[in-house]
Amino acid sequence: MTLKLRIAIIGQSNFASDVLEIFLERSNIEIVGVFTIPDKGNREDILATTAKAHQIPVFKFASWRRKGIAIPEVLEQYASVGANLNVLPYCSQFIPMEVIDGAALGSICYHPSILPRHRGASAISWTLIEGDEVAGFSIFWADDGLDTGPLLLTRQTNLEPTDTLDTIYKRFLYPEGVKAMGVAVDLVAKGEAYKITQTEVGATYDPAMFKIENQVINLGQTAVRIWNFIRGLDSVPGAIATVVLNTGDEVVEEQVRLFGAHLYSAGPVSNAQPLRLKGLSKPALVHEGGLLIEGTDGAFVNVRRLKRGSKVIAASDWFKQANQEPIKDFTEDELSKKHALASIWQAILKDSIEPSTDFFAAGAGSMDVVRLVEEVKETFDVPLENEHVFMAPVFEEFFDQLVRILRQGSSSTGGNRKQVPFKGFLLNANKREIQVPTQLFVNGEFVDAEGGRTLDIINPTDEKILAKVACASAADVDKAVQAAHKAFYGAWKQVSARQRGQLMLKLADLMEQHKEELATIESVDSGAVYTLALKTHIGMSIDAWRYFAGWCDKIQGNTIPVNPARPNNVLTFTRKEPIGVCGLVTPWNYPLMMLSWKMAACIAAGNTCLIKPAQTCPLTALKFAELAVLAGFPPGVINVLPGKGSDAGQAVADHHLVRKLGFTGSTPIGKHIMKSCADSNLKKCSLELGGKSPLIIFADCDLDKAVKHGMSSVFFNKGENCIAAGRLFIEDRVHDEFVRRVVKDLRSMTIGDPLNRSTAHGPQNHKAHYDKLIEFCQRGVEEGATLVYGGGPVPNLKGYFFTPTVFTNVEDDMFIAQEESFGPIMIISKFNASDVDSVMHRANRTEYGLASGVFTKDISKALSFADRIEAGTVFVNVYNKTDVAAPFGGFKQSGYGKDLGQEALNEYLKTKCVTIEY
Ligand code: NAP
């Protein structure tokens, strides 16, 4: 038979409230009254609120006794509800025996330890402090002692090395405790509840940890005992240690609380700074991962967080003086968010919110932290952790922190980030005034290079020095790599894949807003014709960021049907993971576009990076860095280091923390770099190298189109185009006509200032390259090729202007037929269509294999060409038609690995294979 229970709940907090809710699910239970603590300010205990919602009478007593004697009015009110069972789920008050014995069936009480061990108010803490192997709880019959009554039931769980006071409570003591209270009352109702007398063997009564003197850690113990003490008080109230600071004339002591401890066995730490703690014979060490404390046994405990005053900081930041300046330039949107945030705080704290309101001082507990974090995440779409509340418990600071996270681009409406200061120069060009940074961009800041080294940046149009730009050394590269490494394992990991995509989109939008500025800089710095710079150099850069932004949250692995290990099953799946810190080294022909092709894929895959742009034209990369800050990329994710290849570039290839090198440049340097990648740390590398791309024009083509595309295949971007057609094979029947038309068009080509909208051909990128082209043509003439047009500098023009050039009658073994010019030089040979095999053979007789092209109206010829040509890119009846979605990269000595398209992502990912037997 089941008894009808008339229960009085005496207690408080979420735990008691949840116990009440599960009792309400039982038809044999009537909750006749709830007895709880008085309101704190306007804040009512949740048990009272829940009871009222179910129309249960609520009584709030400040105390049940006066001078040790039960208060008669209180007893009277208790008696008025007529309970036959008292349930004390979590009760901080002293309940008189008149009440304990006042219900016919008695009083049952929840206690968070396996009694008789750890009697007293701080049982959970002591379970950890004493290094118990199991934790648990007891439900016992209250008597006149302290946690001494007979046991009704106990439950236990193994303690994990990662457990803290918070985790055991949340994962076991709370949820299982609530359920067990239901089981206990069911046993009572059925008359089956045990009453097992507690033994005194193994009984302890432990000191209360709410007394501040008991919270002070004894550091003269083994590492395990130090660790257990810290986690036993984590996160409330936190173990207290005293830092001893020697300020020169005086010794100052500062109390701190320690959180996030673990035993440390990762070996020596680098760049550590000593910090004296009272009671510790050797100084503790502040390092990148926290604060290392050595126990008396020589083993170490690492502490990740410290509470100074009301603020929790990363222990690694102890010596960082530069406390962040509070934000002053809130946008209207941000200020409206402040109201919404205040409403959330108000709903939780049930009190008006001032800028100085301290979440915890206002009475919030750990469940309130969870609620705050969830509500803020939901309302503002930001990644927030409980830690953020502990780190900024005061409203004003919390709001400041929220805005910083929002400005890092988490939500679609994220505000604008503040511009970082930089030294630069004012570029007055194209009817614009453009501020251009001239410093290295490392860890989110513009900084001078070590020793103030600089590079002269020359305008190829007038040969004048445009600016002096910082020139990175190997030491500067190391700083950037360390920052990228820290960001990869820190701030960048906190940014979800979708948020990463949003940041990239925001950056692309900023590039679009500044595209005229970027194109102007590119034009002045690299000699690119402005209209082309706008459309291709910058346009395709923006496209690349948008295209790869879309990939961020679509990077997926596979599930793979492997052989099961009978009788068990096996599940195998792959994960695609970012590689880590990536080094990018790029050439000068499309400065921003080469950066974007590589970096957009690298960042989309979740890596952090540093780029060494070509020394001759790094300006758009630096302007880009400024925009990356505005977009909200966390410091260290993107670093830009202008410098010399032999120095900074080599340091990137050699660095042990760089795990992938994305390189675009010449074949000889590519080979050298590959060796460095192997010798240093066997880093993965992808190489986009030189080319000598063949273009075959059959007589059956659309000749107008063939001439137009044939010209752009060579002269596009002044021939400084890696896929430029390095050799044209023209069928003998149209050869002369083709040459005639090309020369005619060249005669009317406008050459001059690249910023002029009518200009079709600007100066070559830099002097060494320009000189190399002059030499290249001299070599062609010497070897007996026919120079039909050009062959040298544009007469009467200052700057590196080189006349577009045409050679015919070029033999296969001539230097100009074999080597890449990387300039506006068309190399033409004839062929006879009766022997297509021969021309295919000649087209493939090169160590390069970057691109190729064919013009014919015969689909069979075109497809046969596409089958047989040894090149990574094939154009049919078109040339230079690249797209950010199409993979781009060469064969043979043109390198390997792709830029662009989905394949480029794989260059910046590694595959992990996971196998599970079940
Ligand atoms: P490069 O001389 O090979 O230089 C490329 C980059 O590598 C530059 O940033 C250069 O720094 C750096 N570098 C030089 N030595 C280095 C070293 N020891 N370690 C690390 N980095 C080093 O090529 P480039 O003359 O700038 O560019 C032209 C070449 O790039 C052509 O061959 C062209 O075909 C090729 N390219 C290929 C593609 C493609 O996708 N396949 C695209 C564009 C260009 P400095 O600035 O100090 O020289």
Image (cartoon, rainbow, N blue to C red):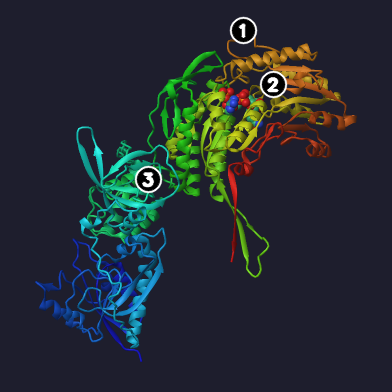
Disc 2 to disc 3, C-alpha distance: 54 Å
At a point 36% along the width and 51% down the height, the residue shown is 297
Q: How many marks?
A: 3
Is 291 left or right of 682, judged from the image as shown?
A: left
Q: Residue furthest front?
A: 297
Is residue 532 visible in the rendered image? The answer is: no
Q: Which type of secondary structure does the marked residue at label 3 adopt?
A: strand
Eye-nearest disc, 2 or 3? 3
Q: Quadrant of the C terminus?
A: bottom right
Rendered image: mark on residue 123: none
Q: Which mark is residue 796?
A: 1
Depth check, mark 2 against mark 1: the one in front is 2
Disc number lying in front (1 or 3): 3
- Along the line of sight, the residue nearer the viewer: 281 or 334: 281
Residue 683's quadrant in the figure? Answer: top right
Indicate left or right for 309 with 902 as reference. Answer: left
Q: Position of residue 1 (x, y in %)?
A: 36, 92
Q: What x and y, as percent, mark residue 551? A: 56, 46
